[in-house]
Image (cartoon, coloured by chain):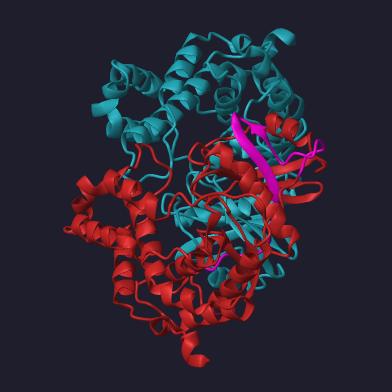
Chain colours: A red, B cyan
Amino acid sequence: MAVYTDVAADELADFLSQYDLGELLSYKGIAEGVENSNFLLHTTKGSFILTLYEKRVAKNDLPFFLALMTHLAEHGVNCPLPVKGRDGEALRELSGRPAAIITFLEGVWPRKPNAAHCAGVGEGLARMHLAGANFAIRRANALSVAGWRPLFDAAASRADEVQPGLRAFLAAELDYLASGVWPTNLPEGVIHADLFNDNVFFLGDKLSGIIDFTFACNDMLAYDVAICLNAWCFEPDHSFNVTKARAFLNAYGRVRKLSEAEEAALPLLARGAAIRFLLTRLVDWLNVPPGALVRPKDPLEYVRKLRFHQSVSSVRDYGLMPSGLVA
Amino acid sequence: MAVYTDVAADELADFLSQYDLGELLSYKGIAEGVENSNFLLHTTKGSFILTLYEKRVAKNDLPFFLALMTHLAEHGVNCPLPVKGRDGEALRELSGRPAAIITFLEGVWPRKPNAAHCAGVGEGLARMHLAGANFAIRRANALSVAGWRPLFDAAASRADEVQPGLRAFLAAELDYLASGVWPTNLPEGVIHADLFNDNVFFLGDKLSGIIDFTFACNDMLAYDVAICLNAWCFEPDHSFNVTKARAFLNAYGRVRKLSEAEEAALPLLARGAAIRFLLTRLVDWLNVPPGALVRPKDPLEYVRKLRFHQSVSSVRDYGLMPSGLVA
């Protein structure tokens, strides 16, 4: 939760005069998102989200994110549509930060997701993967295998302060994942890469919005599936809920069928997804700046999740009947 | 900026079912207010603010705040109107906290107030004082003279860490203000007691809302005027802007004329107001809890303001021609 950069009312009114969005009625900094400053605007034309991109987001990536949202929204995905100014540009500057306005999506993110939510996410993720297929711009995933080692190096010397033995546990897992086992020939495309429950809105049980594309990139589509298994299918006590996983995977499969190779790779991809979030959380945990406005998330949650995936032998353990057997 | 308590979507939907506010469309924690958790709700009936009152606000005071807002809104003040549930109650409980829904006011608070804003505040404050005249419930001001000494005692031993000599400076001022000089016979009524710029909304130059009555109480009306002199009429470099003060005081006086006694007391009341905010900020500054989500405000700003008021000899220095001379 954070607003890192405040905006003066007259500055914002000037900024809005470049758009066809009517008069400013109000704006409130919203306590969601940890990377950027977000404001909910009311204008005489409706509700919008204003984002000021803070330094943690690379400026060069912003055209990718905005073009992707535009592409997806135009291809039927329930995601925010970047609003263009009268000059045709969606990206400009405000208070010394790159800034953009996107449409506001009604809906609430589920604090306690149920199986119906997981099914909604599965369907929505698959639709997003299909809609992204012909998106032209590419962005590498900086947080895949090659990106994990530098994170580990940054945190290793103090990892055991967080949990005794954590350093060795992480080192062994990284060695394994870097030993040539990581899949390379699975279908690729645009992935969200951060589809946690606070990035998915519902009205009732119906998915009404997918937001926050600041980690979106090109990678294996099944890796996005593996991230969601981590993000949606564990209980608050970190136990795996196979009913939710089955609902998620079946709903995904009805829209975009996972290949046998993708299914077979899922346990490994889930281990990778777990260590990715474990490492970024660990680095954040060990580097809380003085006066931080954001409480870091607990990295140890992902130790538990990673151990679970290490114990998985096939997608059966995720509630899915392997395709090979169904055929 | 803070949301201390999050609310689950199903909990909130249950809560809303006690009102006639239609269906929940969305809710966002908003990064304003340091005492409570506030959410901006969209329902099929419009926009509303949901407040969860955190422990710093005494539960016994909540009926006063809600009844006061209702009274003021019904007497023409642009302030939020508490929304009653079907049972006629505005105050209930959510996520283990006392909670209330109030109407949402459009408008933006001025980050850089100009003289027109100050005039708007003067007029609005005077109207609020008149509208509060026949409000029946009473609440003592816990942060007047008698409340300052305990704050000083809590901070004194470490005051010089913040600025060398601060302890002696505060002790001398408190001794002076407690020496029998503090006025006792000025007109009293309901005061806002915290009318800073983030609590006043404007649409253009027109005041559209006065919010956050969590410090409202009964006290001398001119003390509220003195608080606003501190809150609105200094520049970011802490210099006093007499043009803004004149605009504020003249606008106030056109709606509710200050008596000669009130005018004469203004420099002293302004010293009291300055030390009140100096002390609470100092205590907060010295007591930032680990993991705090709120950056404490700088107490030294009020040392500068207090020194200015100590140098004032009459309301002339605030830009006002004393009433006695005008007559």
Q: Does A161 sit left or right of A229 as displayed?
A: left
Q: Is residue A258 above or below residue A77?
A: below
Q: What residue is shown at x 61% (from left), y 18% (from top)? A: B263
Between residue A57 and residue A327, name the one nearer to us: A327
Quadrant of the rendered structure where residue B47 is? bottom right
Is A97 within the magenta? yes
Q: Is residue B188 visible?
A: no
Between residue B27 and residue A109, name the one nearer to us: A109
Q: Is residue A292 above or below residue A169?
A: above
- Give the magenta range: A84-111
Q: Is residue B226 above or below residue B108?
A: above
Instruction: List x then y, in percent, for residue A32.
Output: 53, 52
Q: Is residue B317 visible?
A: yes
Is A257 within the magenta? no
- Residue farthest left in this picture: A164
Instruction: List x then y, in percent, for residue A289.
Output: 35, 38
Instruction: List x then y, in percent, for residue A61.
Output: 57, 42
Q: What residue is shown at x 54% (from left), y 68% (from top)? A: A110
Magenta span dominant secondary structure? loop
Between residue A161 and residue B148, name the one nearer to us: A161
Q: What residue is shown at x 41% (from left), y 32% (from top)? A: B281
Instruction: List x then y, in percent, for residue A150.
Output: 33, 46
The mark total stands at 0
Between residue B80 and residue A96, name the one nearer to us: A96
Q: Is residue B20 above or below residue B30?
A: below
Q: What residue is shown at x 61% (from left), y 42% (from top)? A: A62
